[in-house]
Image (cartoon, rainbow, N blue to C red):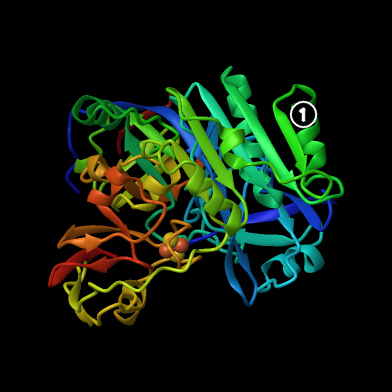
Amino acid sequence: MPTAPGWNGLVAHLHITPRAFLPMQGQESIALVAGEGIVGDRYRIGVEQGFYSEKPEEGRQVTLFEAEALEAIRRDYKIELLPEEHRRNITTRGVPLNWLVGQRFRIGPCLVEATRLSIPCRHIEEILGREVFNPMVHRSGLNCRILEGGTVRVGDAIRPE
Amino acid sequence: MPRHITLRVVAAAEAGPGIRRLTLQDPDGWRLPRVRPGAHLDLQVPGVGPRAYSLCGDPAEEDRWVIAVRREATSRGGSAWLHEALRPGDMVASAMPRCTFPLEEAATHHVMIAGGIGVTPFLSMAPMLERAGRSWVLHVLHRGGPPPCGDDLAPWAALGRVVLHDTLSAPRPDLATLLGPHRAGIQAYCCGPPAMLEGFAAATIAWPAGAARMEHFVPPALPPDPDARPYLLVRAATGESVEVAAGESMLAALRRMGANVDSSCEGGICGACEIRWLEGEPIHRDLVLPAARRATHLMACVAHCASARLVVEA
Ligand code: FES
């Protein structure tokens, strides 16, 4: 499988939330479980709480968002979106997420496979009370499946496999 | 998409005659979505549907939401359930809180008038105003006995911020006198029974638009619209369309097409059924959408349409 050469990124922020609508909370490290998701996060497969939990998806065990996209949104739309507000788990720096669909790469010790680009959801506007849907079209991050689990920490390297 | 937030009842206590105060938290005590003062919750009442209750806790307490509910003799099921069925430990489901009764941040003096349990939204505004160093006064009109949410009011009353008016032991105060004339920087608010809202509307009729805000508990009866006409309603997402008869509910028409639109009051006061419109000329008949937002959004439960075709995002 071809890889996008010449990039070398890192983990800037980590966030999880156990249920839909609740605020994302910053973490120093998160535990990725192969084939399932992140311990304590709403998208983890197999731990649905039945009562109105967010529907887990096979291809969305962990989600990524570029720090550079937050900066672009601030520049182009004058909207200050914080890392805990985009509602993805890993905020990356120096990783061309939009080029990685179908590829495998390492986040710290973990191996993931990008399944598809995330699409923004109108409900983020309801949660934030701000009109961020349009600014997030085409820069809403990446969904991945976890092939090899482990602990990911802030500052860990992200690199092509 | 899950439409609900799961909450656990962590405390329940009496808060005045026929009033029950409930504290709700995430089952793991996780932080809850941030709320604005004046916001309300739509709780999902089993077998009844969503019912709106104003949040009355301090919005700065991010791990809990508090509501105070009066047992209504003519309850449609909501208050009876909250009073008799719910116990600490029980789980409830709510929609995201919505704020249709916001504080006017720019105002320098806030005059609030509450009728009975209508005090609840002001209890969430009070700490925000106090911290911001604003000048404010809350008049609470109640009929005999201890006032509603007396324990929450007591510290504010001690500071002279809250004035209690027992209408059983003294004549009912004149709202125009409580408000005084309109002056620069003043913002007035009223939440209470329909007759009180009418009195408030009359007392502020000459005030500039927006300087006097009202929160309704029950939707006022809407007069029939003599200009109502049939129109074609189009869903932008699917391109489907449906004929809407003159005066027919847009919400019902959307649901006929399978659109998943929330609703609660179905009378234009709660904000649950807000959708975006793209083309056409909607007639807004709600009481909650700010003028600027009407350029892009409408309340589907009460809106009509002046054009032959209306395209909406739903
Ligand atoms: S359902 Fe309440 S405003 Fe439409």
Q: Secondary structure at mark 1?
A: helix
Quadrant of the snapshot with the C terminus of chain B:
bottom left
Q: How many marks?
A: 1
- From the viewer's perspective, tell me whether residue A71 is left or right of residue B172: left
Residue B227 to residue B89: above or below: below
Q: Where ligand 1 lies, by quadrant?
A: bottom left
- From the viewer's perspective, tell me whether residue A23 is left or right of residue B308: right
Q: Residue furthest top?
A: B133
Quadrant of the snapshot with the N terminus of chain B:
bottom left
The amino acid on which the numbered mark 1 sits, given as a three-letter code, is Ala
Pick whichever, B193 or A134, lies toward us. B193
Residue in the picture at 66% in, 43% down: B56
Q: Could you tell me if residue A151 is visible in this image?
A: no
Residue B246 to residue B104: above or below: below
- Quadrant assignment, res B232: bottom left
> Would you name the residue on which mark 1 appears?
B157
- From the viewer's perspective, tell me whether residue B285 is left or right of residue B218: left
Pick whichever, A136 or B124, lies toward us. B124
Across and down, in percent, residue B29 comes to 69, 43
Instruction: Tell me: is circle 1 under 8 Å from ligand 1.
Output: no
Q: Could you tell me if residue B192 is visible in this image?
A: yes
Across and down, in percent, residue B31 comes to 61, 39
- From the viewer's perspective, tell me whether residue A140 is left or right of residue B178: left
Across and down, in percent, residue B134 comes to 56, 20
Residue in the picture at 43% in, 24% down: B106
